Amino acid sequence: MLAASDRLPTLPQRVLVAGVSGAGKSTLSRRVAELLGLPYTELDSLFHGPNWEPRADFLSDVEHLSSAPGWATEWQYRQVRPLLAERAQLLIWLDYPVRVSMSRLIRRTVRRRLRREELWNGNYEGPLWGIFTDDDHIIRWGWNTRHSLKKLVPTLESKFPGLRVVRLTSPAEAEAWLGRLGQRVQG
């Protein structure tokens, strides 16, 4: 596993970003895609259909995405993680402290709800009081899964030999890493 200060052996063409809810997977995926000139696909937009129902084409859409020569996306959804990891060249792990990810998740959820931001396929954040009544409310989900990657991510390089993992432990470390990546891309 690479640290934030380690140089990537090559510039990747297929990139995943892993992290718990609220860590910033989508934001970092977009930024990496832009730096490397790769197409970005938000996995949530492939998974969620109208009324938050899972889309029937999700697996085939991810198979199509992962077969392309270049892409960046988030590493989430248990059923497609192996497929994505098998094809990816780099996985960036946002291993941030719980206080960072949870505060980001809460702020994002409140902002989306108050502004009535459309998310994917006509879906919106549910009522904020749902945190008390809905086991799947995103804030409860974030709390309940906050340690879910700690044992999983460190095993990936041995399971997927073509995959390099870089671990970033703070937003500042992520910014510094992105800066170095940008410098390398520019030559």
Image: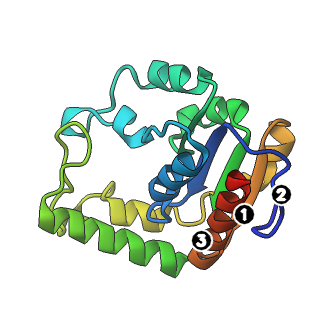
Which label sits on residue 175? 3
N-terminal of the pair, mark 1 or mark 2, is 2
**Mark 2 residue crowding within 10 angstroms, few (<14) / some (14–19) / many (20+):** some
Are the two marked residues, 1 and 2, in contact with CB atoms closer than 8 angstroms?
Answer: yes
The picture places residue 157, in percent across and down from the top left corner, at: 82, 45
Q: Which residue is mark 1?
A: 167
Say which element carries label 1: strand
Residue that appears at 75% across and 68% down: 4
Identify the element where label 2 is drawn. loop
Find residue 1 and name its label: 2
Label 1, label 3: how far apart the Cα atoms are: 13 Å
Residue 159 in percent (x, y) is at 82, 38
Under mark 2, the amino acid is: Met
Q: Is residue 8 visible?
A: yes
- Depth check: give the residue in front, 7 or 24: 7
- Image marks 3 and 2: residues in contact by CB distance under 8 Å: no
* Residue at the spot 18% in from the left edge and 49% down from the top edge: 118
Q: Give the farthest residue toward the bottom.
A: 99
Image position of 1 with respect to 163: above or below: below
* Quarter-of-image position of residue 80: top right
Q: Position of residue 92 (x, y in %)?
A: 66, 55
Q: Secondary structure at mark 3?
A: helix
Amino acid bearing label 3: Glu
Quadrant of image for the C terminus: bottom right
Q: Nearer the viewer, residue 17 or 12?
A: 12
Q: Considering the image in quadrants, where does the N terminus appear? A: bottom right
